[in-house]
Image: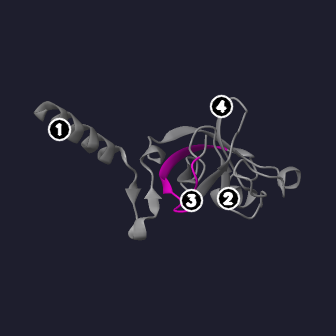
Amino acid sequence: MQMRKMVGLMALGLVACAAPSLGPGGDEAVATESRSEAQRGQASFYHPHHFTGRPMANGEPFDPRSNSAAHRTLPLGTVAEVTNLRNGESRTVVIEDRGPYVRGRIIDVSPRTADELGMRESGTAPVEVRPVGRQANAGRDE
């Protein structure tokens, strides 16, 4: 009987350690699965005329003036810092869509973010993508 209690307490401890951290008021501020290693690769940006108003993976319409971004594997709602490795410019984006589906590209950013990162003229740039958290109101995906 003593062994069962011990195993139960150990299991409870493991569950507590795996739970996401909570912000003030119990809102989920940072989910542990959104904190992963930085990735390096090429960034591109959404074509402003082709994608404007179309629904993203989260169901919201794409706005070229937003800080929305697409990533293949980061959970929707992940907040990430994108740094242009050519010029050092960094911006914060929110993963709200899936993609890009072009080999070697790891993230698509909005035209506004592309302007701010200094990559609009070239169309692509080498970047580092570092997840930094998760929107408090972000739902779970997949």
127 in magenta: yes
Q: Which residue is mark 4?
A: 104
Q: Are marks 4 and 3 in contact (CB under 8 Å)?
A: no
| Residue 49 shown left or right of residue 22 in the figure | right
Name the mark nearer the viewer: 1 or 2: 1
The amino acid type of the residue labelled 4 equals Gly
Give how far apart the Cα atoms at labels 4 and 3 are: 21 Å
Q: Earlier in the sequence, mark 3 or mark 2?
A: 3
Q: Earlier in the sequence, mark 4 or mark 3?
A: 3
Magenta-tinted stretch: 125-140
Q: Which residue is mark 3?
A: 92
Q: Which mark is residue 113?
A: 2
Q: Which mark is residue 5?
A: 1
Looking at the rendered image, the quarter that the C terminus falls into is top right
Report the residue at 72% width, 47% height from top. 57
Q: Which mark is residue 99?
A: none
**Residue 4's image quarter?**
top left
Q: Position of residue 139 (x, y in %)?
A: 58, 54
Q: Earlier in the sequence, mark 4 or mark 1?
A: 1
Q: Earlier in the sequence, mark 2 or mark 4?
A: 4
Give how far apart the Cα atoms at labels 4 and 1 are: 51 Å
Q: Earlier in the sequence, mark 1 or mark 2?
A: 1
